[in-house]
Image (tube, rainbow, N blue to C red):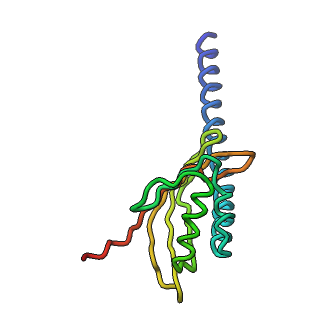
């Protein structure tokens, strides 16, 4: 009788592991959907020239890590940073989410971006990592870092 009990306990333990893994995948899928929706809102705000709207998609304690720049801290400063990008002539933004992994109220997104100017000219393209944090019931950008994949001009 003992081997049957052990086998049953092992099967129950394995079932919990499988259910936990399935739950984790389901959470990742739910969070990915929320992240992609927030990215669409980010792009829409950018295209409207609404840097304040972009800033509101970040957490209160957010930090951005732009290429060749210092850390930008807080929603207001991040909004000013994105306003400078808007003012620089960027006309289009494409964000492509490659993966999202979540654990509780924190998630990590890896993706690629493309910035275009007049006539669809590619101004920059690269990759990014965003740490998302659930704040006030919504997923918001908490740490935002990106860098170009375009070779720098040799001077």
Question: What residue occupies the far bottom of the structure in this picture?
Answer: 119
Q: Residue at x 48, y 84 (%)?
A: 121
Quadrant where the N terminus sits is top right
In the picture, residue 84 is in which quadrant? bottom right
Q: Is residue 137 left or right of residue 13?
A: right
Q: Residue at x 67, y 46 (%)?
A: 26
Q: Give above or below for 133 relative to 120.
A: above
Percent coordinates x, y for residue 89 in the rendering = 53, 80
> Quick one: 56 or 23, which is closer to the camera?
56
Q: Give above or below for 130 relative to 116.
A: above
Percent coordinates x, y for residue 119 in the rendering = 53, 89
Quadrant where the C terminus sits is bottom left
Percent coordinates x, y for residue 9 in the rendering = 63, 20
Question: What residue occupies the far top of the structure in this picture?
Answer: 2
Q: Residue at x 61, y 10 (%)?
A: 2
Question: What residue occupies the far left of the structure in this picture?
Answer: 155
Q: In this view, does 154 lie to the left or right of 28?
A: left
> Quick one: 19 or 138, which is closer to the camera?
138
**Mark count:** 0
């Amino acid at each position: 009788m003992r081997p049957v009990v052990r086998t049953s306990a092992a099967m129950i333990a394995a079932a919990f592991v499988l259910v936990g893994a399935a739950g984790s995948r389901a959470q990742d899928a739910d969070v990915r959907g929320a992240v992609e929706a927030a990215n669409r809102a980010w792009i829409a705000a950018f295209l409207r020239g609404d840097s304040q709207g972009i800033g509101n998609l970040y957490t209160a304690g957010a930090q951005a890590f732009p290429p060749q720049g210092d850390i930008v801290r807080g929603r207001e400063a991040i909004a000013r940073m994105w306003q400078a990008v808007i003012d620089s002539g960027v006309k289009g933004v494409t964000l492509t989410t490659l993966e999202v992994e979540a654990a509780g109220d924190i998630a990590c997104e890896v993706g690629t971006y493309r910035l275009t100017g007049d006539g669809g000219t590619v101004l920059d393209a690269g990759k990014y990592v965003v740490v998302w944090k659930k704040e006030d019931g919504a997923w918001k950008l908490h740490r935002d870092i990106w860098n170009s994949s375009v070779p720098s001009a040799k001077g």
